[in-house]
């Protein structure tokens, strides 16, 4: 019986480890895909899961960077949700291939809809031209619940490399792979007087890191169960 108890303890610990790895990763507000090419145009989705069992998400507010502003931003209509795009004056003009940029989108707010417990929603945005002088764009996001709680996803990465409690959605930027230096769309595809031609940038994976961790953790639990069952079978086998 002591062996069985030890085996049960190991199984419980493995299960707890799996839950600890998977649930936080799935619960974060993230940007999908998480990587795009510098100098190009891309389409992303802000993935917002509902973390509460007794409340629904009713508003999502995404702040856009003003130190590396984006000249072209457009949103995809989402049934049941109202969207408001706020454009504001930048602290100082930013030079772009289309001239000095003095105003840009600073905030996008989705409201009027509902993300119920156990559900998530994706809010899609097309944007560009992505800057070439930085390797990441940060989009602090506020998630409002039906009971009035506001979760501010705006934490910067910790100095020791571990993940913050409420990390801000971050789009990593990599050098352009195309020969024209404009990533997935050339400058001629995005005239200043019209919306740019936007195509998604290929990412390393289309699935979220949280889903990968969840599947990996599930495999770990199944493996531990197999080891426990095998050990019990050997222990109960009568000696020859």
Image (cartoon, helix red, strand yellow):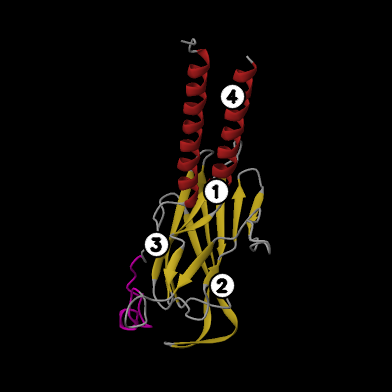
Bounds of the magenta segment: 184-200
Labels 2, 3: front one: 3
Which residue in the protein does label 4 denote?
7
Q: CA distance from mark 1 to mark 4?
A: 28 Å
The secondary element bearing badge 3 is classed as loop
Mark 1 / mark 4, whichever is N-terminal: 4
Identity of the residue drawn at 52% across and 40% down = 116
The secondary element bearing badge 1 is classed as helix
Mark 2 / mark 3, whichever is N-terminal: 2
Q: CA distance from mark 1 to mark 2?
A: 24 Å
**Would you say residue 181 is visible in this rendering?**
yes
Which residue in the protein does label 2 denote?
65
**Would you say residue 51 is visible in this rendering?**
no
Which residue in the protein does label 1 denote?
25
Q: CA distance from mark 4 to mark 3?
A: 41 Å
Q: Nearer the viewer, residue 185 or 54?
A: 185
Q: Is residue 100 above or below residue 88?
A: below
Mark 4 / mark 3, whichever is N-terminal: 4
Q: Is residue 132 magenta?
A: no
The secondary element bearing badge 4 is classed as helix
Counting from the top left corner in percent of width and height, residue 166 is at: 64, 54
Q: Are marks 2 and 4 in contact (CB under 8 Å)?
A: no
Q: Is residue 75 above or below residue 209?
A: below
Labels 2, 4: front one: 4
Q: Are marks 1 and 4 in contact (CB under 8 Å)?
A: no
Mark 1 / mark 2, whichever is N-terminal: 1
């Amino acid at each position: 019986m002591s062996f069985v108890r030890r085996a049960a303890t190991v199984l419980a610990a493995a299960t707890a480890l799996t839950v600890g790895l998977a649930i936080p990763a799935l619960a974060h507000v993230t940007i999908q895909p998480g990587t795009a090419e510098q100098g190009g145009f891309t389409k992303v989705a802000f993935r917002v899961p509902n973390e509460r069992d007794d409340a629904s998400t009713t508003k999502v507010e995404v702040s856009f960077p003003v130190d590396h502003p984006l000249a072209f931003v457009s949103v995809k209509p989402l049934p049941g949700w109202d969207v408001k795009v706020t454009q504001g004056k930048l602290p100082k003009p930013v030079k772009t291939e289309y001239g000095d940029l003095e105003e840009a989108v600073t905030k996008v707010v989705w409201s009027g809809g509902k993300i119920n417990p156990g559900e998530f929603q994706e809010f899609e945005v097309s944007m560009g031209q992505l800057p070439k002088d930085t390797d990441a764009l940060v989009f602090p996001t506020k998630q409002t619940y039906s009971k009035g709680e506001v979760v501010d996803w705006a934490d910067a990465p910790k100095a020791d490399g571990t993940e913050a409690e409420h990390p801000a959605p971050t789009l990593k930027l990599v050098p352009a792979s195309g020969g024209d230096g404009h990533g997935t769309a050339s400058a001629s595809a995005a005239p200043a007087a019209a919306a740019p031609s936007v195509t998604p940038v290929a990412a390393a994976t289309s699935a979220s890191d949280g889903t990968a961790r969840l599947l990996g953790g599930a495999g770990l639990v199944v493996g531990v169960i197999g080891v426990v069952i095998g050990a019990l079978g050997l222990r109960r086998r009568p000696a020859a």
